[in-house]
Image (spheres, coloured by chain):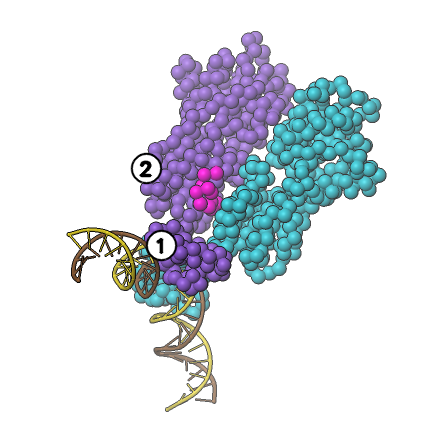
Chain colours: A cyan, B purple, C brown, D yellow
DNA sequence: GAATATATCCAAAACGTTTTGGATGGAAAT
DNA sequence: ATTTCCATCCAAAACGTTTTGGATATATTC
C-alpha cells in the first residue's frame, strides 16, 4: 500500500503538495499537478480513510439508525425503501451508509453511544418510530448533525403527514357512506406516526359528527398475525361494523385473510383499508386500498436535508403529503344491514 | 471531547496504561484499573475510532456489498433478510455494517475501489448475483477478507444449493404427473444462482426421461411485470403446458396474475411454482408453492464464516440445503387434456 | 547478597493524512 | 534599488490512538 510519502517521493514534491493537489487546491503549476497525478497513477495510490478521518475530522460516513422494535425493522419493507431513497442521494455525494439497528437495551445503547461519540460519523439519519426513544437525544447531545424521519422535536426532521393520512382514510370511508367503522391500531406507546394517524381519524370523525368514542379500537402489533387476531375480536364484539381501518398494511392483510377464513367477503361484507402502500399490496385479493407515505421520497428528502445541514445551512422541516391509493378492498356498504352473525365468529 | 491524554492526566498514569487497561491487558493493579476507570467515567471518555483505526489497522467495520443490477437490489426483499442475518451475528461481535451498492459503471467501480482500498474495512461480505462481476476480484486483490454469498470462485463462500433447488421443483411437478412443463427464467448472463436452478431443472428432467430441449423457456428480468409478459408468451406458444416453473417468486406472482387475468385458474388450469419463498407469498391466492433458500441463515452463515476468517481460521464453504415449500399453486394436472384455447390468449 | 525473574508501568514511535505557518523565488510597484 | 506582492511549494505540527522497548521496583532463587 503506497502512502502519501511514497507518492511525494516519486513525484519529487512534499506530502503537503500531494495532499493539496489531490484536493484541487489552487496555486500549483500544471507541471506539478501532472507529476503528482502520474505518481499517484504509477503507485495506484488511494488515500487511507482512517488517517484522513483523523486528520480532517470528517469521515464521509453517515449513520442510518433504525431503532429495533418488535424485531420489525428488518421485516418492514418500508425500511428498505427508505434506505434506497437515502442511498440514492447520499452515495452520489460521496457518502457511505453505516447501518445501525440498536436494540433498546442498556448494552446496545452503550454500543450505540460508542458509535456516535466516536467521531466516526459525519451525520445521522434516524427513524423515530418509538416515542421518547433516547436515540435522538443522544445524537443531538453529541453535536452530530442529525435528521430524524418522524416527529421527534429536533432541529431537522422530515416526515409524511400521518395525521392527514388518517384523515384521508376515514373521509374516504365516510364518503362511501360507512358509519360503523372499526380501527386496528397499536399500543399508543409504540409508534409515533401511528398515533398521529389515529388522531387524524378521530378528529375527522368528530368533524363529521361521528362520536370518536364510538369507534371501536382493537390493538395489534404491526404484524400480519396480530391483524388476524384483532379483526376477529373486533367483528365479534361489534358485528355491525361495515369498515375497518388498519393502521398499517400488514395488519390489514391479516385482517382480510382472517375475514375470508370466516367466510366473509372483502369488501362486500366488510371494507378494509390499510396504511403504507407496501410494494405487494396491489397484488392481494382484493387489492388493498391504502395510503402511500412516499417512503422513497422521504428517504431522499432526509438525505437532502442532512446534506444541507452538513453544508452549514438550516433547511426547513419537510412534510410530505400522503396520497390515498384507491383499490378494491373498500366499497360502499350494502344498504340492507345484513347481520354478520352468519359468519362463524369464533 | 475528552481524549486519552485527558484521562491519563486525571488518573495520573500514562496514555499507554489507559489504552491497555481499556483493552483488558493483564499486569495492572486493581488500584490502577480503578483509577483509570474512574477517570474514564468522570470525563465520559469514548475512544476515537478513526485514531484507533489508524493506529491499529482495524476498523471493526465490514462492508456489505450488493452489486446494483436492474435496480433490483433495494426492491428485492431477500436482500433485507440477508442483511438481517448478517447483522444478527456481526453486531453482537462488535462489528458495524457499511452498506455499499456500487452500480456497475466505471465511476461507481472507482468509488468502490476507493472504499475497499482505503483501509476502512476489516472485511467484506458480497453477493455475487452477477456472473463475472469484477467486485470479488477487486476485493481479493486487496487481501481483504472476503466471503461471497454465491458461486464465485473465491476462498470463502456461502450459498444455498440452487441446483438442488431446481431439482426439487421439477421433481415435485413430475411426481404430480406433469409432463408439459414450461420455464420462466432470466438471461443467462444476469444471475449465477438462477443459472444453477435452471441447470438442476434440465438435468433432472433428463434423468426422468423428459427431453430438456422440449421444455419451453421464456425470459423475464425478475420483475413481476416480466413474469406477466413471459407467461402470456409461453401459454400462447405452448397451449398444452400444465405447469410452469418460475425461477423467482416475483415472476411467479406476475405469472399467476396474468393467468387469472386471462380467465385461467391456478392451479386447476396451470400449476405455477416459484423460487425464494418471499415473506408474503403464502398470502397470495393461491398461496405460492416455492423453494426456500433460507436467506436469513445464509446471512448468518456468511457472517460466521467472515468472523472465522478474521480470526485467522480457514472455514469451509457452507452449502445450505434448499427446502420445498408446498402450498396451493401447484396440483396434479387434470387427466383430461382440456385445450387451453378456451382462455383468451391475446 | 548477588542474580534472576516477575509484575507494573511509562516514554516515545508509529499509523497516514490535513493543515498551519512560513520560505523562496520572481514580478510588479515605488 | 529597494520594497511589496503573489504564486508556488515545503517542513513540521497535529489528529488520538496502539504498540514497542524498555525502566523500575519487588519478589524469588541460588
| Magenta stretch bounds | B88-100
Give yes or no for residue B24 being in the magenta stretch. no
- For disc 1, the marked residue is B28
In percent of the image, x 49 and y 51: which residue is there? A115
Mark sitting on residue B120:
none
| Circle 2 SS class | loop
Mark sitting on residue B314:
2
Q: Nearer the viewer, residue A152 or A41?
A: A152
Q: Residue furthest right?
A: A209
Where in the figure is residue B33, as x and y percent of width and height?
Answer: 40, 55
Q: Quadrant of residue C3?
A: bottom left
- Do the residues at pointers 2 and 1 share their chain? yes
Q: Residue furthest top?
A: B336
Give yes or no for residue B97 being in the magenta stretch. yes
Task: Please say if B27 is above or below A332.
Answer: below
The mark closer to the camera, 2 or 1, is 1
Task: Please say if A269 is above or below C24.
Answer: above
Amino acid at each position: 500500500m503506497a502512502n502519501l510519502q511514497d507518492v511525494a517521493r516519486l513525484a519529487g514534491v512534499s506530502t503537503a503538495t500531494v495532499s493539496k493537489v489531490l484536493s484541487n487546491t489552487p496555486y500549483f503549476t500544471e507541471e506539478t499537478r501532472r507529476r503528482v497525478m502520474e505518481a499517484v497513477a504509477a503507485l495506484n495510490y488511494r488515500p487511507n480513510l482512517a488517517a484522513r478521518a483523523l486528520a480532517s475530522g470528517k469521515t464521509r460516513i453517515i449513520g442510518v439508525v433504525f431503532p429495533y422494535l418488535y424485531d420489525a425493522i428488518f421485516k418492514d419493507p418500508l425500511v428498505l425503501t427508505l434506505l434506497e431513497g437515502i442511498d440514492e442521494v447520499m452515495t452520489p455525494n460521496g457518502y457511505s451508509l453505516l447501518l445501525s439497528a440498536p436494540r433498546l437495551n442498556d448494552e446496545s445503547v452503550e454500543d450505540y453511544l460508542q458509535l456516535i461519540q466516536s467521531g466516526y460519523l459525519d451525520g445521522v439519519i434516524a427513524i423515530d418510530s418509538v416515542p421518547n426513544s433516547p436515540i435522538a437525544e443522544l445524537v443531538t447531545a453529541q453535536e452530530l448533525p442529525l435528521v430524524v424521519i418522524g416527529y421527534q422535536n429536533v432541529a431537522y426532521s422530515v416526515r409524511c403527514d400521518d395525521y392527514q393520512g388518517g384523515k384521508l382514510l376515514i373521509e374516504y370511508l365516510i364518503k362511501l357512506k360507512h358509519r360503523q367503522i372499526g380501527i386496528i391500531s397499536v399500543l399508543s406507546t409504540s409508534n409515533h406516526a401511528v398515533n398521529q394517524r389515529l388522531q387524524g381519524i378521530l378528529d375527522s370523525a368528530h368533524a363529521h359528527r361521528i362520536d370518536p368514542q364510538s369507534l371501536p379500537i382493537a390493538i395489534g402489533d404491526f404484524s400480519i398475525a396480530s391483524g388476524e387476531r384483532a379483526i376477529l375480536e373486533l367483528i365479534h364484539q361489534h358485528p355491525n361494523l361495515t369498515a375497518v381501518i388498519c393502521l398499517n398494511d400488514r395488519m390489514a392483510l391479516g385482517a382480510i385473510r382472517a375475514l375470508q377464513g370466516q367466510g366473509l367477503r372483502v369488501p362486500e361484507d366488510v371494507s378494509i383499508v390499510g396504511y403504507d402502500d407496501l410494494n405487494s399490496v396491489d397484488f392481494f385479493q382484493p387489492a388493498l386500498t391504502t395510503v402511500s407515505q412516499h417512503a422513497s421520497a422521504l428517504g431522499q428528502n432526509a438525505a437532502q436535508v442532512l446534506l444541507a445541514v452538513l453544508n452549514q445551512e438550516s433547511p426547513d422541516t419537510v412534510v410530505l403529503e400522503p396520497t390515498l391509493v384507491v383499490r378494491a378492498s373498500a366499497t360502499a356498504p350494502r344498504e340492507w344491514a345484513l347481520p354478520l352473525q352468519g359468519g362463524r365468529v369464533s
